[in-house]
């Protein structure tokens, strides 16, 4: 039995739909009911996600736990919530997985990875060197799972890049930016870019991981685009001309003081991003969905939602 946390999130609700389609048995552990899973006939258990007793009741020997739940603090304003959701919850789940000899699939993030000189990557073991709440607390959780792996925990840590695609009910930051860019003519951009991966590809990779014996870290990446390349592609897909103006990083970070929803952390993530090359990726994801198809699905879903609002 696959046991899922974070099933109402972007990756989670798509994973659930694929499992239903493939008739793979699973259940979800939630803190509340929500529209994301409405109408789906699934086994749901509502409870306190910080209570070890809740997990002990619903996680059994032989299960596979997919831990997706967490908190993305893009504005870097709530360390306590980040620590609780990203580290404490993960620690509780990982401890129980070790205790009950359960395989754990943990969704970390490429935001915790540092690039090494040989084009590799690593997780910084000194969390004091990690600057912002989200990557800091995800790093803490990632390192804790690595510690338990040395004690016998059967786990694999996945590092998705920026996940985009269908059924984005809560509105991922990447999805929001793509939709906003599709509507604008004038688009300021900074140096840098990001890697985008389709949510369906990530979900399929998670299922592959659940049924594999792989315990090595795996990056789940897709296509790397600079912001300028990204805006050009959006212009091509929408048929709308885009006027792009380069903004120096320092000026962009200053501008986040006046633009709601943007933060210095987001500017730095884009500035520092580089393509990932992980040979292990192909072990879980044989091929990627073409980025044009993914972007079209994002824009199409946004258009459908706008039509529904007008009714």
Image (cartoon, rainbow, N blue to C red):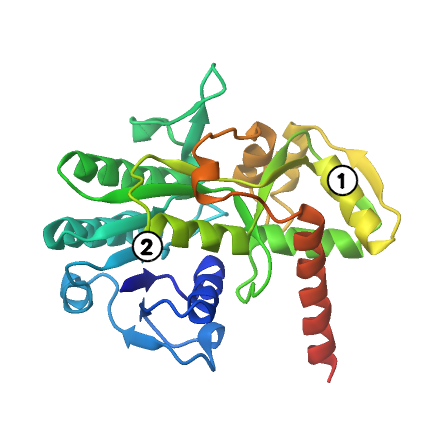
Element under disc 1:
strand
Please tell me which residue lies in front, 46 or 28: 28
Residue at 67% x, 36% y: name it.
Answer: 225
* Crowd tier of the residue under label 1, counting other residues whose Cα lies within 10 Å: few below 14, some 14–19, many 20 or above: some
Q: Is residue 25 visible?
A: yes
Element under disc 2:
strand
Badges 2 and 1: C-beta atoms under 8 Å apart?
no
Residue at 26% x, 56% y: name it.
Answer: 64
Please tell me which residue lies in front, 41 or 193: 41
Identify the disc placed on residue 85. none
Q: Quadrant of the N terminus?
A: bottom left
Q: Residue furthest top?
A: 117
Residue at 74% x, 80% y: name it.
Answer: 310
Please tell me whether residue 165 is drawn above or below residue 273 in the rendered image: below
The residue beneath circle 1 is 188
178 relative position to 120: left or right? right
* Residue 104, image x, y percentages: 26, 50
* Residue 53, image x, y percentages: 13, 65
* Crowd tier of the residue under label 2, counting other residues whose Cα lies within 10 Å: few below 14, some 14–19, many 20 or above: many
* Residue 16, image x, y percentages: 43, 66
């Amino acid at each position: 039995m696959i046991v899922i946390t974070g099933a109402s999130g972007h990756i989670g609700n798509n994973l659930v739909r694929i499992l239903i389609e493939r008739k793979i048995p699973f259940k979800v552990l939630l803190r509340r009911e929500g529209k994301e899973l409405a109408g789906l006939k699934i086994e749901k258990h509502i409870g306190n996600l910080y209570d070890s007793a809740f997990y002990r009741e619903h996680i059994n020997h032989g299960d596979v736990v997919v831990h997706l739940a967490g908190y993305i603090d893009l504005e870097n304003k709530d360390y306590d919530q980040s620590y609780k959701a990203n580290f404490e919850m993960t620690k509780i789940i990982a401890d129980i997985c070790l205790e009950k000899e359960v395989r754990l699939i943990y969704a970390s993030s490429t935001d915790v990875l540092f690039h090494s000189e040989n084009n590799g990557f690593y997780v910084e073991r000194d969390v004091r060197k990690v600057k912002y709440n989200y990557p800091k607390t995800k790093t803490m959780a990632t390192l804790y799972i690595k510690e338990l792996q040395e004690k016998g925990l059967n786990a694999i840590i996945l590092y998705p890049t920026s996940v985009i695609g269908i059924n984005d009910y809560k509105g991922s930051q990447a999805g929001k930016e793509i939709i906003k860019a599709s509507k604008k003519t004038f688009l300021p951009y900074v140096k840098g870019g990001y890697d985008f991966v389709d949510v369906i590809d990530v979900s399929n990779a998670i299922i592959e991981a659940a049924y594999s014996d792989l315990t090595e870290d795996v990056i789940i990446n897709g296509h790397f685009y600079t912001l300028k390349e990204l805006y050009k592609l959006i212009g091509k897909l929408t048929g709308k001309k885009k006027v792009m103006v380069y903004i120096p990083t320092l000026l962009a970070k200053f501008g986040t003081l006046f633009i709601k929803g943007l933060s210095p952390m987001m500017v730095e993530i884009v500035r520092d991003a580089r393509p990932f090359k992980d040979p292990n990726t192909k072990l879980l994801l044989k091929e990627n969905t073409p980025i044009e198809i993914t972007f079209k699905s994002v824009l199409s879903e946004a258009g459908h939602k706008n039509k529904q609002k007008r009714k």
